[in-house]
Amino acid sequence: MHIHTVTASALSLLLLTISAPAAAVDRSGFYVFAGSGKATVEWTAQEEGGADGERRHSARPSSSLLGAGYRVNRHLALEMADVRTGGVRQQGVGLLSARSRSVGVVGVVPLGPWELFAKAGVARTTHTFEPDRARRTAAAAEARSRRSHSVVSLGARFHLTPSLSIRVDRGVLGAPDRTFLADSGIDASNTRQWTAGVNYQF
């Protein structure tokens, strides 16, 4: 009988030890986040002069992130986000910018004060291209692409307090459609972005 009592007490203590950290890091509820950083935009375009003038371009404009989410439990959250990149101007080509709005499911891996997360969802990305005067015509003063696509991003959080954390996000914006590429004179475009900011939980 004494052995059963000790065993039961030991099991109770073990369960209490395991469940206590889980309760301490339970961060369910609504939260908001914002950040800023850089984007890497790469594209190829025909320079003035025809096919022989095709060149590959690359630039690193600013990037911003604004969003909100709901933490379901320790390992699952739902988020919506708005990502924007600053305009990229290439002499002789034009000004290229992008904005992406997304909703997704977030999987979270808690590691003490750290959390790693991955998000998968759908996004609506808008690319805008304003050609330089030398390339501008009455029929193509501006090109715009709105495209829905799947999206995957990665990130990490470090909790400073139960409510406030530092957050880093890394993702890829969807490519513009073929009509946009044809209208803008761009042969291909690729945009990656990262941001660092804060996450506040209510």
Image (cartoon, rainbow, N blue to C red):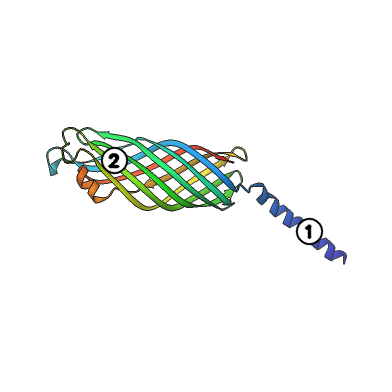
Residue designated by label 2: 128
Question: Is residue 122 toward the left or the right of residue 16 in the image?
Answer: left
Instruction: Check disc 2 and report its element: helix, strand or loop.
Output: strand
Q: Is residue 106 above or below residue 62?
A: below
Amino acid carrying label 2: it is Thr
Q: CA distance from mark 1 to mark 2?
A: 64 Å
x, y percent for residue 196: 47, 37
Comparing 56 with 30, the one in front is: 30
Indicate the quadrant containing the N terminus: top left, top right, bottom left or bottom right: bottom right
x, y percent for residue 47: 17, 38
Q: Residue at x 35, y 52 (%)?
A: 148
* Residue 193, picture quadrant: top left
Question: Is residue 53 toward the left or the right of residue 202 in the image?
Answer: left
Q: Which of disc 2 and disc 1 is earlier in sequence?
A: 1
Residue designated by label 1: 10
Question: Is residue 59 toward the left or the right of residue 91 in the image?
Answer: right
1 vs 2, front mark: 2
Query: Circles 1 and 2: CB distance less than 8 Å?
Result: no
Q: Residue furthest bottom?
A: 1
Comparing 142 with 90, the one in front is: 142
Amino acid carrying label 1: it is Ala
Q: Residue at x 13, y 42 (%)?
A: 52
